[in-house]
Amino acid sequence: MEVLKDMSPGSADYPFLLMTFEKFLIDILKHQDKKSGLWHTILDDPETYIESSVSAMFLYALLVNRKYNLVDTLCDPAIQLTWDGLARLVQENGVFSGVSEGTDPSDKNEYTARNVGTYTWGTGAFLLAACENSRDK
């Protein structure tokens, strides 16, 4: 998506990247937890915990898509649901919670054993999405 917004639609690689991004959006929207508005640490496993940093990154992608009209996918309901879910994780002192500790590619047992709390990468992802959300209005 970062490449698409700056790439010429006439570029030879543009159609493939656009198709890949569209598939990505369709797939993540299928797995959004409708109750929290966020995503599970293992996207297609609703038994795993909700993870806020990936949800913030997905929100950023949805907002950029809307801003640049990259893919004609109805994202507005998902955007609001995600924003509402993330906003609930910002504590009164500004701390953003619900972030998984660092992970490497691994199996379900490894992912579900991770601590969840406050980590800088999650706060950064949230701030990126929040900045894009404020520009989008």
Image (spheres, grey):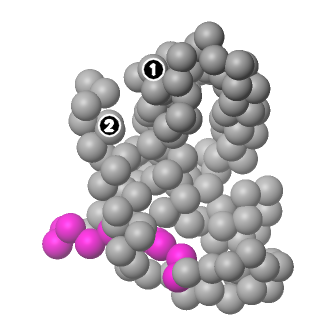
Q: Is label 2 in a helix, a strand or a loop?
A: helix
Tell me, for residue 68, which label it has, or none: 1
For the point 59% across and 13% down, the residue is 9
16 in relation to 126, above or below:
above
Q: Residue furthest top?
A: 10
Tell me, for residue 135, which label it has, or none: none
The residues tagged by marks 1 and 2 sit, at their Cα atoms, a distance apart of: 13 Å
- The amino acid on which the numbered mark 1 sits, given as a three-letter code, is Tyr
86 in relation to 97, above or below:
above
52 in relation to 67, above or below:
below
Local crowd at mark 2 within 10 Å, few (<14), some, or many (≥20)?
some
Q: Quadrant of the C terminus?
A: top left
Q: Residue furthest front?
A: 12
Residue range corresponding to the magenta coloring: 92-101
58 in relation to 18, above or below:
below
Q: Main secondary structure of the magenta part?
A: loop
Q: Is label 1 in a helix, a strand or a loop?
A: helix
- The amino acid on which the numbered mark 2 sits, given as a three-letter code, is Asn
Tell me, for residue 133, which label it has, or none: 2
Q: Earlier in the sequence, mark 1 or mark 2?
A: 1
